[in-house]
Amino acid sequence: MTRRKNPYPGVRRNIVSGHIYWKFEAGDFRCNIPGPYGGPEFLAAYEAALKGAKAPRSTAEPGTVAWLIEQYLGSLKFLNLSQSRKRSIRGELDWLRGMAGKYHFARLEVRHIEALMGKKTGPTAANTVKKNLSMLFNFAAKKLGYTGPNPARFAEKMKTNPDGYHTWTDAEVDRFLARHPAGSKARLVLLLALNTGMSRSDLCRVGWQHVTQTGGKARIAYKRAKTSVAADLPILPDLAEELAKVPKDRLLFITQDAKPIGYKPETLGNWFRDRCTEAKVPGSLHGLRKAGATRLADVGASNWEIASYLAHKDTKQADTYTKKANRSKLADSGFAKLTNVSNFPDTLDRKAKNADQ
């Protein structure tokens, strides 16, 4: 008789005083696996053990939203996220646990999902609730044996601004630079964000260790904290001029005023918004990232050139910038052809007027 292969390598059965429990061993790492063999709690703990981590002991009632969130936070899916994404989604799930943690997730209906969405201010935040709940239901189906529906999938999505964050205009950049002089931290932050496309989390940790000299030209290279995608960019003259004012022995380019330590991403974003208010511009750091991509698209940069600036692994987002730039150029070329045709009424057709004179 052929012995059946163990579906969970590393797990072995222990029997103590007639009680069966499961133990995981891989190298020097060992831990107990709770719950019935192959059950939801067992699977969540096994996934964490494969990563060398112990699943958090659940304090929530099994089957509740709070319990489901705990299972997700102890899973490989969560552990594989970047540190910045872990922080943001943990905060989002903490809010969800506070609002609906006691309810059994299998009993939730579309109307319950939309009611939770309605407790958020603004369409983007409401849609984030829908997205996170849908993600949790999918996780339950793939990893915990849940076979019910995903009501979040059918909840009505709120309409949002298709352009998202405001994209800085050249005039707004000039106004900001006029308000914040050379050598100021505000000016350095703007030029770093505009010329490198760095996000808040990347701006908080960039320093001289990211700058290199290649063929007599300075470059700045880093990996995005969110995606680990690498970027390697030339340092343009206006940014080089500001960086020259930063002490060479300073680990970080951007430090707090009170003491030489870095910012948290959220704190830097709030600080920069205050500088925008001083300059009377409706800007944000993410809007500068979009402005840099728009600037490249307007001068004919390819999708991959824009993706390299954004440190994206594909050109999906870059496509939106090139399409907008191409539409504008096509409109110009189309109207140029139209104005060469003298079939307007005399009152509108300058060529016809000139011919009559």
Image (spheres, rainbow, N blue to C red):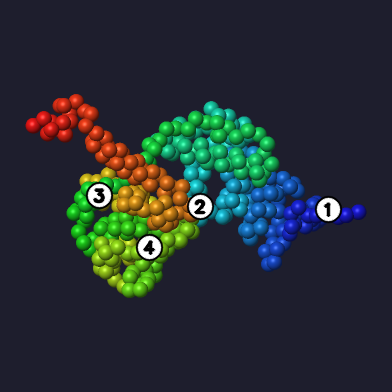
Left/right of residue 42 with respect to residue 313 in the rendered view: right
Seen as rendered, the residue at the extreme right is 1
- Give the mark, 1 or 4, whose residue is nearer the N terminus: 1
- Give the mark, 2 or 3, whose residue is nearer the N terminus: 2
Instruction: Describe the element under mark 4 as helix, strand or loop.
Output: strand
What's under tag 4, amino acid-wise?
Leu
Q: Which residue is mark 4?
A: 233
- Give the mark, 3 or 4, whose residue is nearer the N terminus: 3
Instruction: Describe the element under mark 2 as helix, strand or loop.
Output: helix
Q: Which residue is mark 3?
A: 170
Q: Which residue is mark 2?
A: 86
Q: How far separated are the C-alphas under marks 1 and 4?
A: 55 Å
Quadrant assignment, res 49:
bottom right
Q: Residue at x 73, y 59 (%)?
A: 10
- Give the mark, 4 or 2, whose residue is nearer the N terminus: 2
Give the vertical position of 306 relative to 340 (above or below).
below
Disc nearest the viewer among 1 and 4? 4
Disc nearest the viewer among 4 and 2? 4
Q: Which residue is mark 1?
A: 4
Regarding residue 101, the answer to whether it shows in the image is no
* Crowd tier of the residue under label 2, counting other residues whose Cα lies within 10 Å: few below 14, some 14–19, many 20 or above: some
Q: Nearer the viewer, residue 163 or 137?
A: 163
Q: How far separated are the C-alphas under marks 2 and 3?
A: 35 Å
Q: Nearer the viewer, residue 215 or 190?
A: 215
Q: Are marks 2 and 3 in contact (CB under 8 Å)?
A: no
Q: Are marks 3 and 1 in contact (CB under 8 Å)?
A: no
Q: Nearer the viewer, residue 223 or 11?
A: 223
Q: Are marks 3 and 4 in contact (CB under 8 Å)?
A: no
- Give the mark, 1 or 2, whose residue is nearer the N terminus: 1
Q: Where does residue 299 sit, x and y in percent of width and height? A: 31, 52
